[in-house]
Image: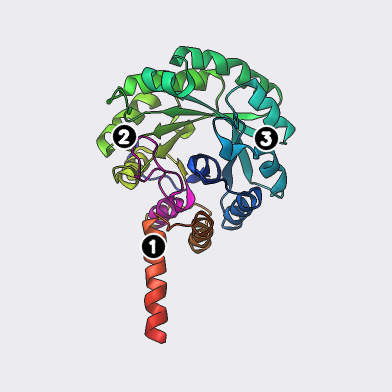
Amino acid sequence: MPETFPHRVKIVEVGPRDGLQNEAVFVSTENKIALIERLIAAGVGYVEAAAFVSPKWVPQMADAAEVLRGVAHHDGVTLAALVPNLKGLDAAMAAGCKEVAVFAAASETFSQKNINCSIAESIARFEPVIAQARAHDIKVRGYVSCVLGCPFEGFVAPEQVAHVATALYELGCYEISLGDTIGAGTPTHTKEMLAACARSIPLNALAGHFHDTWGMAIANIYAALQCGVAIFDSSVSGVGGCPYSPGATGNVATEDVVYLCHALGIETGIDLSKLVETGAYISTVLGRSSVSRVANATQGQQIRRTSETA
């Protein structure tokens, strides 16, 4: 695998969906729309905006259709939604969604506890969803959870991750997001997992989705960049905790990923200062501080400069 960095990285902003879905207090439709519009204004070109899932299980996503319809059209910007089945796909299409995502796990136990079926059954369920989406010219992205460890099984073999990822890719998912669900992965394990997946899936179809539970997200992203991966999922302000480690950080902050990329000379198309402002906005809405180290460092510099000129 190549040891050179890609020239440009695609950032998949998952805060409005993967981040907010873990919030206990409902975030208003207006605030969700405002968050997405601010992300787009900062240069984010891909936003996972909603999920068409049962509001009984994920009440935060009950307004998915209203959110998608409320965001203004922007050329070159993709608004995607997570769908678990054909019913969710139909709802997403009715809301005008042009790209959807399906999700599987690399761990049998996690699959059973998360979606009440085996890995093989989950893949079979998604086959008609992917087929129907593609028949309507809707692109499908695939997620694989627990690629660097499972909260129930512990270690997950790279070959098992590759098996599940390949199944989704061969069904028609154009891109596979590899998720470190519990955030316990290390750079060495990351490289081994990516090497296994790259044996059957083109490297440009692989994305990294790293959680920062153990503080390894940026290190793992750096390792993935060394392997040639050029697509990363992240959440502005680090919104979204880790349900398997209560109180721990979940999604890696988009600000931190963008800062790393820019420091390495990698283009993202994102204005970091506007992104930090967007993170501050959603942090205020949620009533807590950002977990982004870059955002907090930026704010600290601003405070020092203000005090020096006062």
Q: Which mark is residue 123?
A: none
Answer whether labels 1 and 2 touch (C-beta < 8 Å).
no
Identity of the amino acid at label 1? Asn
SS class, disc 1: helix
Front residue of this view, candidates 62 and 172: 62
Q: Residue at x 55, y 34 (%)?
A: 58
Q: Which residue is mark 1?
A: 296
Whether residue 13 is visible:
no
Answer whether labels 3 and 1 touch (C-beta < 8 Å).
no
Is 256 part of what is drawn in magenta? yes
Q: Which mark is residue 98?
A: 3
Q: Earlier in the sequence, mark 3 or mark 2?
A: 3
User: Which tag is nearer the camera, tag 1 or tag 2?
Assistant: 1
Q: Where are the magenta residues, as a range?
A: 235-262
Q: Residue at x 46, y 12 (%)?
A: 120
SS class, disc 2: helix
Q: Which residue is mark 2?
A: 190
Query: Can you say which quadrant of the picture contains the C terminus?
Result: bottom left
Q: CA distance from mark 3 to mark 1?
A: 35 Å
